[in-house]
Image (cartoon, grey):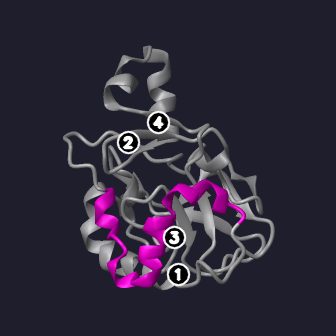
Amino acid sequence: MLHPHTELRRINDEVGYGLFATRLIPLGTITWALDPLDQILDPYTSDQLEDQYHGDIKRYSWVTGQGKRILCWDFGRFMNHSCEANTYAPGGCEFEIAVRDIAPGEELTCDYTTLNLEAPLVCQCGTALCRQTIKADDLAAIAVRCDALIRSAFTHLRTVQQPLWHWVENNQMEINAMLACPETIPSVLQHRWNSSPLVSAGKSMGYL
């Protein structure tokens, strides 16, 4: 489930579509949460689908640290990559938060390195920290920075409006523990699926 103050916009022919804020989304806001309508496919189930579905499944889904493939039913599948992403998910969590204020009209982005890429991706984010080519094994190199951003943002979780709070209610004990001691928030390294080969091409690959 996406934050309600977002909309899908076409960027250009090369990149395709992206998600943009329609109002200010403050630091610490939950921007996406797993929804009961989202499809959760284990490796066996996704492999057993007819061939005609395999391309779309790989293009529009990503793989969790437990090897399950998540296919968003809403526009969450169109979120693009940035090497300076403004949303991240704490390790092992099924929701993402804004790690800085996201201005009206600004694109919401995530880092595909946390989504178990199947193959390297040529990056077009153009940020100062652009890695040029995005690979699954980048995760170890960026984890310290990502974890620091997440832990800092998490301290704002209870101070901003949370339209998606209903979708994380089942995680209240876990969230309260993380709020009590942000230093213990699990690292993004927990997103890594260690099976071989990696099985995801990212949420949308940013080129749709």
| Nearer-N-terminus badge (3/4) | 4
Q: CA distance from mark 3 to mark 4?
A: 24 Å
Q: Which mark is residue 153?
A: 1
Which residue does the numbered mark 3 point to in the structure image? Answer: 85
The three-letter code of the residue at mark 1 reads Ala
Q: Please name whichever residue, 179 or 25, is drawn nearer the observer in this view of the structure.
A: 179
Sequence-wise, the earlier of marks 1 and 3 is 3
Q: Element under label 2?
A: loop
Residue 38 vertical position relative to residue 138 in the rendered view, above or below: above
Question: Which residue shows up at 31% across the image and 79% down it?
Answer: 144
Mark 4 lies on a secondary structure that is: strand
Comparing labels 3 and 4, the label whose residue is closer to the camera:
4
Classify 10 Å Cα crowding around label 2: few (below 14), some (14-19), many (20 and above).
many
Find residue 147 and report its horizontal and vertical position in percent. 37, 77
| Image mark for residue 40 | 4
Pointer 3 and pointer 4: residues touching (CB < 8 Å)? no
Which disc, if any, is residue 200? 2
The answer for how far apart the CA atoms under marks 4 and 2 are is 13 Å
Q: Give the residue at x 80% y 71%.
A: 23
Q: Is residue 176 left or right of residue 44?
A: right
What is the span of residues highlighted in magenta in the rendered image? Answer: 163-191
Compared across the picture, whether 206 is left or right of 6 comes to: left
CA separation, marks 2 and 3?
Answer: 19 Å
